[in-house]
Image: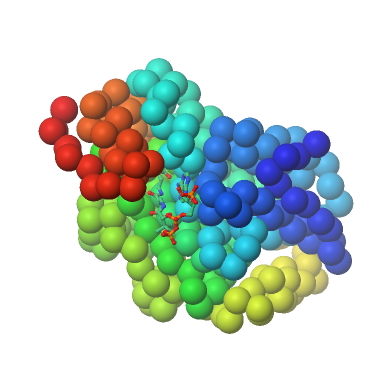
Amino acid sequence: MYNNLLLREENGILIVTINREKALNALNTQTMLELKQLFEEDAPQRAIHGVILTGAGPKAFVAGADISEFLTLDVEKGREMAQRGHDTFFAIERFPKPVIAAVNGFALGGGCELAMACHMRIASENARFGQPEVSLGIIPGYGGTQRLIQHIGKGKAMELLLTGDMIAAPEALQLGLVNHVVPQESLLDKAQEILAKIAAKGPVAVTKVIESVNAYFQFDAFGFDTEVTAFAHTTGTSDFKEGASAFLEKRSPAFQGK
Ligand code: CO8
């Protein structure tokens, strides 16, 4: 049923592992479609009290959207992909049971955006976060320009989005981007411990807390639309082709500003 996601249930918790370790669990189209199916159709039917999302291997949670698919993108496809990603990440954010990202390494670009769409983030000590899209000549297209501000505030979000800098787990903790930092071997245990605590609470109350906290940010809806349009615009530039080609050819990009 899923090619790139591994699913298992333990004590009423659905543990989802993004399983493309060789590509550092990058979100290719197939993986995005599977996440959409999981959160829109499959998980809502399951008798679970929470979800943990993590990445395969010790190195990466998700190193971003799959750059090897970028060279065929144009403005229309870019808009479609960004919009579909937004729909999927909103399905995660609005999932009626708590969803925790267990960030076991790099969470970059779409990976950082995926983690930010979850209700909480637990990071392993080697985790690193960033929105490096500008290095490729594009902008975040899965909600990063909006959710990063929600999590860490405008000034620091602006710095990370404009420089593409990565931050390590301790700084992510200090900024409030993650809830806890733990040794990698304790990552799932910590997430399970939090979900077990929540499982003892009133289920309707838990769902209503999620709904109410999300409602605080409803006014941001226009910002998400702006991001889709701006992302689509950047996918039409030659800078974007140059940025993606440079990454794939393991060289520095030479941007022309068009
Ligand atoms: N996409 C595809 N392949 C990737 C990606 C990626 N995002 N990240 C890593 N890989 C691949 C590498 O190409 C490499 O493959 P190979 O072994 O075949 O050469 C393998 O994974 C291992 O990676 P590295 O050799 O580069 O490992 P390092 O330890 O040297 O570096 C890094 C690790 C720092 C994580 C480095 O791989 C890196 O910088 N990756 C790219 C990070 C990035 O720029 N992510 C953002 C992508 S853009 C994005 O996410 C936009 C989201 C919105 C999209 C909206 C619709 C399309």
Q: Where is residue 234 in the image (x, y as percent from the top left)?
A: 28, 30
Task: Give 178 or 257, whichever is nearer the viewer.
Answer: 257
Residue at 29% from the left image edge and 23% from the top image edge: 236
Q: Position of residue 15 (x, y in %)?
A: 74, 58
Q: Where is residue 42 in the image (x, y as percent from the top left)?
A: 78, 39
Quarter holding residue 122: bottom right
Q: Position of residue 49 (x, y in %)?
A: 78, 59
Residue at 62% from the left image edge and 49% from the top image edge: 20
Residue at 17% from the left image edge and 37% from the top image edge: 255
258 left or right of 8?
left
Quarter holding residue 97: bottom right
Q: Which residue lies furthest to the left in this view?
A: 256
The answer to whether residue 93 is visible is yes
> Where the C terminus falls, by quadrant?
top left
Task: Give 201 or 183, whichever is nearer the viewer.
Answer: 183
234 left or right of 93?
left
Task: Give 233 or 94, whichever is nearer the viewer.
Answer: 233
Position above or below: 255 against 188: above
Please say which color scheme the image uses. rainbow
Position above or below: 161 against 128: above
248 left or right of 43?
left
Position above or below: 182 against 240: below
Quarter holding residue 34: top right
Task: Count every numbered label the image shows and give the total.
Answer: 0
Residue at 80% from the left image edge and 36% from the top image edge: 1
The answer to whether residue 116 is visible is no
Task: Give 62 or 200, whichever is nearer the viewer.
Answer: 62
